[in-house]
Amino acid sequence: MNNELKHLAIIMDGNGRWAKEKGLARTKGHERGAEVIRDITEYCSNHPSIQTLTLYAFSTENWKRPKLEVDFLMRLLDKYLANELETYHKHNVRFETIGDISKFSASLQKRIELTKEATKNHTNIAQILALNYGSRDEITRAVNKVLEANLAITEENISKMLDTPYSDIDLLIRTSGEQRLSNFLLWQASYSEFYFTATYWPDFTPHELDDIIAKFYDRDRTFGGLS
Ligand code: IPE
Ligand code: IPE
Ligand code: MG
């Protein structure tokens, strides 16, 4: 076991199909999916090497969905953060976000800020929710910040201006069988290992995550060099 897993990222996909297959409204899939976030966060907080868990929750493209679904997701996020404060405290988890939350309602932005503030000294792991996140948007904003600061356009300076202190993704998982990035972490996943599972996010478990991590340890990561 040579690989070290510090930063895990997950594209939580398949909520709608999970619900549809059960004859339920898509919103039920989102509700169940929010509960899975808690289980997976708890697993990561007990893992010996994971420091950061980044979860794709709402993309810059998800605004294209019906207004009713978008509104539901916004309310669900607000409720999730209010309920989860206890979990963040219990497992010493720092809550952070990436993405442009200025497009969210004032009350939701306040909830996000309050949750960040309340958990900012927690040191076990960081749970980063990607909210109104698009990698192209993030990189574009970062380059503009480099220009505004009158700095040279270098990889280092762009990395510094990304939404959170830059950290390479070691393992990126997408649930639901789709095999694409959907504008997630293009910069940070340059040398990430990818794992795609057919499991819908609401059925994803710490047990399956544990199996995937075991496979990650067997991968040969050469970063352009030789093994
Ligand atoms: C992921 O599940 C959650 C969000 C994108 C908010 P989906 O809602 O994309 O579920 P499917 O892909 O339609 O099944
Ligand atoms: C990606 O899933 C975004 C999130 C999981 C939040 P989507 O379901 O929106 O992506 P596409 O449409 O399948 O590419
Ligand atoms: Mg989807």
Image: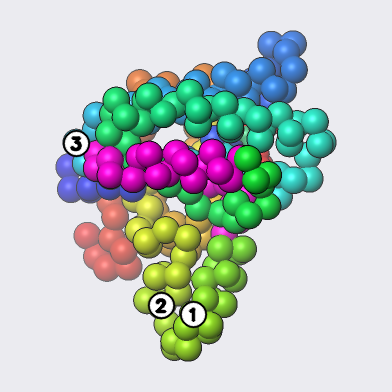
Mark 3: give few (<14), some (14-19) or many (20+) Cα within 10 Å.
few
Q: Secondary structure at mark 3?
A: loop
Q: Secondary structure at mark 1?
A: helix
Looking at the picture, which amino acid does disc 3 mark?
A: Pro
Q: Quadrant of the N terminus?
A: top left
Evaluate whether residue 196 shows in this view.
Answer: yes
Start-end of magenta stretch = 108-135
Residue 117 magenta-highlighted: yes
Pointer 2 with pointer 3, Cβ within 8 A = no
Cα distance between the residues tagged 1 and 3: 35 Å
Q: Quadrant of the C terminus?
A: bottom left
Q: Nearer the viewer, mark 2 or mark 3?
A: 2
Looking at the image, is 168 positioned above or below residue 69?
Answer: below
Looking at the picture, which amino acid does disc 1 mark?
A: Val
Q: Secondary structure at mark 2?
A: helix
Residue that numbered label 3 is attached to: 48
Corner quadrant of residue 107: top right
At a point 71% along the width and 50% down the height, the residue shown is: 61
- Ligand 1: which quarter? top right
Query: Which comes sooner in the sequence, label 2 or label 3?
Result: 3
* In this rendering, position of residue 192 left or right of residue 105: left
Q: Which of 174 and 50 lies nearest the eye of the viewer?
A: 50
Mark 2: give few (<14), some (14-19) or many (20+) Cα within 10 Å.
some
Looking at the picture, which amino acid does disc 2 mark?
A: Asn
Query: Which comes sooner in the sequence, label 1 or label 3?
Result: 3
Corner quadrant of residue 32: top right
**Residue 156 percent location from the top left of the image:** 37, 76
At a point 69% along the width and 26% down the height, the residue shown is: 16
